[in-house]
Image (spheres, rainbow, N blue to C red):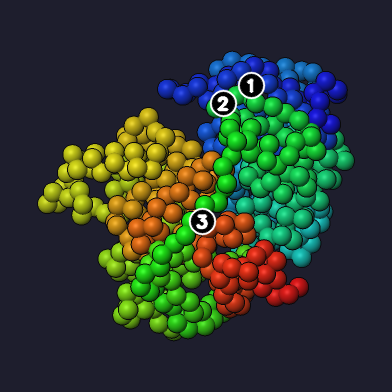
Amino acid sequence: MGGENRNVLLKMEGIDKRFPGVHALKSVDFSLEPGEVCAILGENGAGKSTLMNVLGGIYSPTAGKITIDGEEVVFHNAKDAEKKGIAFIHQELSLFPQMDIASNIYISNLPHSRGRILSKKLRQDTREILKRVKLEHRKPDEIVGDLKIGEQQLIEIGRTLIRGIKVLILDEPTSSLTNAEIEILFEIVRELKRQGTAVIFITHHMDEIYEICDTLMIMRDGKRIMKCGVGDISRTEVVNQMLGHTAEEQYCHPERKYGQEVLAVKGLCRGSRLQNIHFSVRSGEMLGLYGLLGSGRTEVLRSIFGLDKYDSGEIIYMGAPVKIRKPKDAISLKMALVTEDRHKEGLILEESVRFNMTLANLKAIARGIMVDRQKEKILSKSGISALRIKTPSANQQVKYLSGGNQQKVVLSKWLNTDPRLILLDEPTRGIDIGAKQEIYSIIERLLQKGVAVIMVSSEIPELLGVCDKVVVLKNGQQVCELTNDKDLHAAALLEAAMGGE
């Protein structure tokens, strides 16, 4: 199934999309057969999300046409696309957290008679959907906001199953799922495949592509580069085609010189979430925190930075005990935190690149109670240049930047505070390989200047490649600390995180 000349379910021909100052899609052709599972790959800004937004009715193409089952279609909005069998599940879920599961699933198709909702049928139908997405243990009247994020994503997928969908688009669908939930998702995809539904996967995880996908399409600079069967191309060649050149070694870990101890955490406890956590990190050293979802990794960073109050334990900073009650205390000590969710906690999306880059260090651009616009301009221009941020200008709203460039803006914001310690929570999540390499280079420059770094990551190769040592957590408890020598390898990390299971 890698060819495009057999029975065609979907055909997109010559799709062109222009925004003011940006030619996002350049005459892209794309087609799917019934039951085909296709990955769409490309660096941030390659055009893959824009192409899917055109297919999902969110954007109208500047040129080109879309055909479904041989019939040309025109979508003016997402509802039009849904009516033709296109279901798009975004990274940001569109559920109603205050409503129950049944209402969320059947929100636009509630069973009714004579103006009354048939509650018994609604619950019965909901139980069938819950069974299909392996959430039989949940009840139709449970509030969606009380569910785990992974369960909420499965609910959203369940909502698409009540419609006669022909194409399901999944945008980074596994980013919030546990391994068990990922397997459930894959079972659902295989079921849809058997029914003739085509599935499009937007993902940066190579293992997922080779496990679940039949074909892959690579995009670069708004163009389609190639489409083929996943068995017809090696992982190395996929990366090369995405980048447009032979990829250098993804992880760079030169020799580092460590200085004095910057931070020591001793016996940190917070209810059942953190129990007796202890580690230290030195100047110029990079410490990784690893564990499965729910292990307490993010909670450690939040407690250090004053976002969450811990019950007991001690934080030693630059050789002296410190009490950090709020983030302002941490910032005054020259700590920085790059949070996991850059959209909700790292950036103000409606504001400019310039505004976001200077947000954490307003003192540097202050003139009395006013902002010195010239200083702000110089500081932001310097940050854009130093981190090679791709933006038309410093005045561009940050929401229009690619994921990788948004993350650089977050980093630049904190680098303006001249930190001694930087805490990174999944700093490369949801960004492409090329952008990851640039983020690693920025972090490496910080380490060489003597900054201490603590990084949470779910990607074992990333931890192995860039960290000097890794602390493994499980269910809020510290399992072990492994140094980057013969003890630090993938099997050791997994075994420790899973408790030898």
Whichever of callouts 2 and 1 sits on the residue coming sooner in the sequence is 1
Mark linked to residue 28: 1
Looking at the rendered structure, the kind of residue marked 1 is Val
Mark linked to residue 253: 3
Query: Which residue is located at x 43 percent, y 22 percent?
Result: 20
Task: Determine the secondary structure under disc 1.
Answer: strand
| 369 versus 337 height, above or below | above
Q: Is residue 120 left or right of residue 267?
A: right
Q: Are marks 3 and 2 in contact (CB under 8 Å)?
A: no
Task: Determine the secondary structure under disc 2.
Answer: loop
Q: Is residue 353 left or right of residue 88?
A: left
Looking at the rendered structure, the kind of residue marked 3 is His
Query: Which residue is located at x 34 percent, y 39 percent?
Result: 384
Crowd band around label 3 with a 10 angstrom C-alpha radius: few (<14), some (14–19), many (20+): few
Quarter the C terminus occupies: bottom right
Crowd band around label 2 with a 10 angstrom C-alpha radius: few (<14), some (14–19), many (20+): many
**222 or 307: which is nearer to us?**
222
Residue 452, x across and y down, in percent = 40, 64
Q: Is residue 446 left or right of residue 95?
A: left
